Image: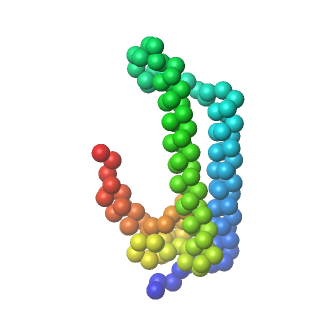
């Protein structure tokens, strides 16, 4: 098993970053809910086309869908963060979940919830090219 180069100090810093990220996301989700109930945020009718009669309904639906998508992205991220925190507790943080190789510290610093090493991430990205 390759040695994990993260020392305790770095690990604690990353754990702190993850907890910060987590509270930011929770904060965002809360704000988003508040925005939605107060008043529909930024209308984007232009992207819906020419449906004159249903424009309002469509844009409302678009807004809602948009928020839902955002929320589900946030939730996905939140889950990754939770899993990273669990990996820290389980002392397996910093290892690629795919090949079990070490993830470079620079990558973890930039993306503390990264769960794949660069090589595996590239392979994954190549495997699911957007249609
Ligand atoms: Zn890997």
Q: Residue at x 33, y 55 (%)?
A: 128
In this figure, what is the number of numbered marks? Answer: 0
Q: Residue at x 66, y 39 (%)?
A: 33
Question: Is 101 on the left-hand or right-hand side of 106?
Answer: left
Question: Is 23 on the left-hand or right-hand side of 128?
Answer: right
Q: Residue at x 48, y 24 (%)?
A: 58
Rendered image quadrant of residue 51: top left
Q: Is residue 75 above or below residue 36?
A: below
Residue 108, position in %: x, y? 54, 65
Residue 85, position in %: x, y? 62, 68
Residue 35, position in %: x, y? 67, 33
Outermost residue to the bottom: 1
Rendered image quadrant of residue 126: bottom left
The answer to whether residue 94 is visible is yes
Q: Residue at x 53, y 31 (%)?
A: 63
Tell me, what colour scheme is on the image? rainbow
Residue placed most toward the observer, 55 or 18 = 55
Outermost residue to the top: 52
Q: Is residue 19 above or below residue 28?
A: below
The answer to whether residue 112 is visible is no
Residue 131, position in %: x, y? 30, 45
């Amino acid at each position: 098993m390759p040695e994990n180069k993260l020392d305790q100090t770095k690990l604690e810093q990353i754990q702190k970053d993850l907890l910060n990220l987590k509270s930011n996301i929770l904060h965002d989700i809360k704000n988003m809910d508040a925005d939605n109930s107060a008043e529909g945020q930024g209308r984007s009718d232009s992207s819906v086309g020419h449906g004159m009669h249903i424009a309002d309904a469509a844009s409302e639906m678009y807004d809602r869908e948009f928020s839902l998508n955002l929320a589900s992205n946030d939730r996905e991220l939140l889950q990754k963060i939770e899993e990273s925190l669990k990996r820290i507790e389980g002392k397996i943080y910093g290892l690629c979940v795919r090949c079990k190789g070490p993830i470079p510290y620079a990558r973890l610093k930039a993306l503390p919830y990264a769960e794949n090493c660069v090589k595996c991430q590239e392979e994954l990205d190549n495997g699911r090219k957007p249609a």
